[in-house]
Amino acid sequence: MKHIFITGGVVSSLGKGLTSASLGMLLESRGYSVRMQKLDPYLNIDPGTMSPYQHGEVYVLDDGAETDLDLGHYERFTVSPLSRNSSWTSGKIYRNVLRRERRGRFLGKTVQVIPHITDEIKRAIRSLRNRDVDFMLTEIGGTVGDIESLPFLEAIRQFALDAGRTNCLFIHLTLLPYLKSSNQLKTKPTQHSVSTLRQIGIQPDILVCRTEMPISDVERNKIGLFCNLNTQDVIEEKDAEFSIYEVPITLHNNGLDNRVLHYFRLDSKEQTEPDLSCWYDILGRLRNPSSEITIAVVGKYAKHKDAYKSIYESIDHAGIKHRTNVRVRGIPSDSFSPKQLDDVDGVLVPGGFGDRGVEGKIDAIRTARERQIPFFGICLGMQCAVIEFARNICGMDKANSTEFDQNTSYPVITLLDEQRNVTDKGGTMRLGAQAAVLNETSNVFKSYGNKEISERHRHRYEFNNSYRDKLREAGLVIAGTSPDGGLVEVVELANHPWFVGVQYHPEFKSKPTKPHPLFDNFIAAAINHAK
Ligand code: GLN
């Protein structure tokens, strides 16, 4: 098994996750088996308790792990299975070490960052080892030079020593800032970043340079010379013009996967070109759309582009399939007014926690229901749809979720077990993949083409079963439940072009090459609405 470590330098948010995922995809498209992993230097045990403002969306895996949004890129680009062991933070590493310390496992030794924390990091990397895997890609979060990153960098340095330098490749992603006034790309920050890495004992083997402008031969030679690299190993990653789905093709055209195989001496054996036809097809569709629609996303973090990352990506995937340019309009739910939906073709209300903006979401759902605009409610969006229906169709005045109003006379959404101890905010949710069964006469059944589905969850509250009959009698369709029938998973409305609320998160299972059936059908309904 070969290891590829990806670090980042100069500034954060350079798209390390995207670059790593793209490389994973390129290696898979050459027939290799790949595993992806992210190591994050921050101290939270997992990102589950972090605000989307701070860290973007929390991405949920099948096994219920709450992870960094970069794992979403991994799943969208590759077929590599992800698990709890694909995501580690300093917090999780320290917790493991400190638990062992409390159990007396260190036999009186002084517990230290080196070797105890670094050993635990190496163990985390090895936790995904598998005989059938060709490449393991480990992305190190943060930026080289950060205090928190140091133990991780030290650990991967040691790892390469243990596993053999020829089995380990270091890729460093940096930025070449462009100075307009002098019409120049500046290489100095990259030189500094590489020199910081080398002080720690890591010589990068490949440098991927984010840039607005093409890198000239002169600049490439200069970077190679100062960073101790072959010029062919200085790879340009120019900003994508249309979409992130250009990135793998750009990197391939600039030689990244070839240079990786060259490093591992795998290039002579199978110098076949990867099959990228479906990715070229995606680009063709993105560049030549045949229609245009507008989807309103009404949420608490509508103006923050990473907070609903997977939802925006899923909308794009369906747009690609339908050759439609989807303009997404983020509408902050705490200042919602129905006028904002005058010219939209679909309304999506995403998941969320806390009461800010909930009334705006309910109002948006009412508008979409009354005006027959396609509506898609996800998790809290589904709960709000149930509240809206109870209030405005069933006359249950001030119906609510007990998350927002403990004393409501109509608690249509409640905690499954109100007695459950929820003082510990970490890991008290219904999390991860769970099965559901769809009603064969429903629209969602038609979308999936399947009665049994499995989708990922992340929530505490549920549809209150004591209101099931009343709401059903008034016309709410219970289109899907848990296999034992005990939990409502999907609601729909008849007499509406497309009105679906799901208690789970379909956005975690959509891929550019295979849009999720519900996003696919929601976008199709929006295209119809636009006609
Ligand atoms: N706050 C709601 C709950 O906990 C919805 C969660 C979500 O939308 N992910 O059930």
Image: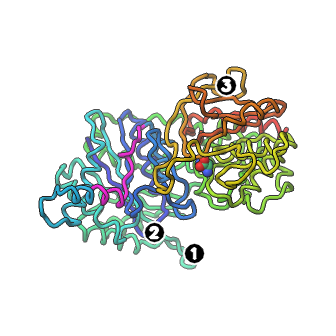
Label 3 to label 2: alpha-carbon separation = 46 Å
Q: Is residue 16 left or right of residue 134?
A: right
Residue positioned most to the top: 440
What span is in magenta? 80-96
Q: How is the image coloured?
A: rainbow
Of callouts 2 and 1, the N-terminal one: 2
Does dot 1 land on a helix, a strand or a loop? loop
- Residue 335, by quadrant, is bottom right
Q: Nearer the viewer, residue 459 or 87?
A: 459
Of callouts 3 and 1, the N-terminal one: 1
Dot label at residue 11: 2
Of callouts 3 and 2, the N-terminal one: 2
Dot label at residue 445: 3
Quarter of the figure that contains the N terminus: top left
Q: Is residue 391 left or right of residue 246?
A: right
Does dot 3 land on a helix, a strand or a loop? helix
Which of label 3 and label 1 is nearer to you?
Answer: 3
Q: x, y percentage for residue 442?
A: 72, 25
Question: Which amino acid, mark 1?
Answer: Lys
Circle 1 residue: 180
Q: Nearer the viewer, residue 19 or 350?
A: 350
- Residue 454, by quadrant, is top right
- Residue 84: say if magenta: yes
Q: Is residue 411 above or below residue 239?
A: above
Label 3 to label 1: alpha-carbon separation = 55 Å
